[in-house]
Amino acid sequence: MEIAGVHIPPGKNITVDIPIFRLPTNTPIDIIAHVFRSKNEGPTMLVLGGIHGDELNGVEIVKRAEKSKMFHKLQAGTVIAVPLLNVFGFINFSRGLPDGKDVNRSFPGTKSGSLASRVAYALTKEILPHVDFGIDFHTGGKSIYNFPQSRAYSADPASIQLAEEFGMPCFIKGGLLNKSLRKTAHKMGIPMIVFEGGESSRMDEFSVDEALKGIQRVLVARNMVPAKKVASNKPIVIERSIWVRANRSGIFRCIKQSGDFVKKGDILGTISGPFGNFEVKVKAKNDGFIYGHNNLPVISQGDALFHIGIVAVT
């Protein structure tokens, strides 16, 4: 295996720096990939965090998996661990890059394009050709908390299988976004799933812990590490969903939250005026499972408040 001109032989653990660009101060920005190789043949797994710079849980998950030495004694195969893809976004507490572009809408990227495109290109050119399957770790967006969940392409049986092995409490089947990492990986024949847990710019131990157990489950299922009993979940499978949005602006108070089952007509929260001049109830429009909710206390009309999944009948 060779990444960015560095040869990584079987049985070795090597860190590779992939140059991307320089800041105006001439400070280099690199993608750092930790490569863990068994002496024995087997699949190559990618674990990736920080494609959005403000999504800290993903960075912490990959970093903590490495620090726990989860990948250090593989009995077969290889793990490529990239804790932080979007270094610039991380430094600046931002989702994207200086030009405002989103790395996860810039794949497969180009060598001479925007900064986001160059980051995407480096991952596509240097890492993905070696990968057999992968997990891309994310969080909810600004103020949106996501219950720990995996997302897989419904038309790809290999991705569905990977999500089932990963074993999150919530499993969402859906499509692929244009110019996303998952779509590019799919075109290359690489099953890739997304983990979502917690919200941006905040650490969430529940999400981190669930993800770490999920990585361990996948390693065991693929015979990359010795068999080990890892507590499993009976997943809540979601095939379609709706957002409940604010019909008034005001102060928002959650009554229900992510992880709750609800019935049509249940009160999910309230919106009240700052001067006590009104209060309205936010109600569920259908039966389902809340897998995302808004933590922002002051909201505007039309803001997304609750993401409710319609649970698949099994």
Image (cartoon, rainbow, N blue to C red):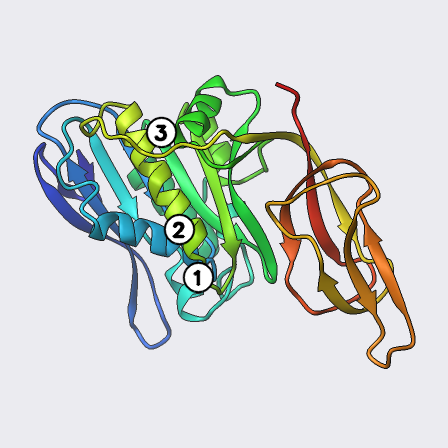
Q: Are marks 3 and 1 in contact (CB under 8 Å)?
A: no
Tag 3, which secondary structure? Answer: strand
Q: In the rendered view, does 19 fall on the left or right side of 232?
A: left
Numbered tag placed on residue 133 in the rendering? 3
Q: Nearer the viewer, residue 291 or 6?
A: 291
Q: Identify residue type, mark 1.
A: Met
Residue 16 shows in this picture: yes
Where residue 294 sits, quadrant-wise, is bottom right
Q: Which residue is mark 2?
A: 208
- List x then y, in percent, for residue 248: 86, 63
Q: Which residue is mark 1?
A: 203
Sort mark 1 into few (<14), some (14-19) or many (20+) by Cα contacts within 10 Å.
some
- List x then y, in percent, for residue 164: 45, 26
Dot placed on the residue nearer the N-terminal end, 3 or 1: 3
Could you tell me which quadrant the N terminus lies in? top left
Tag 2, which secondary structure? Answer: helix
Q: Identify residue type, mark 3.
A: Phe
Q: Are marks 1 and 2 in contact (CB under 8 Å)?
A: yes
- List x then y, in percent, for residue 40: 11, 24
Q: Identify residue type, mark 2.
A: Val
Residue found at the far bottom of this picture:
275
Dot placed on the residue nearer the N-terminal end, 2 or 3: 3
Gap between marks 3 and 1 measured at Cα: 26 Å
Numbered tag placed on residue 286 in the rendering? none
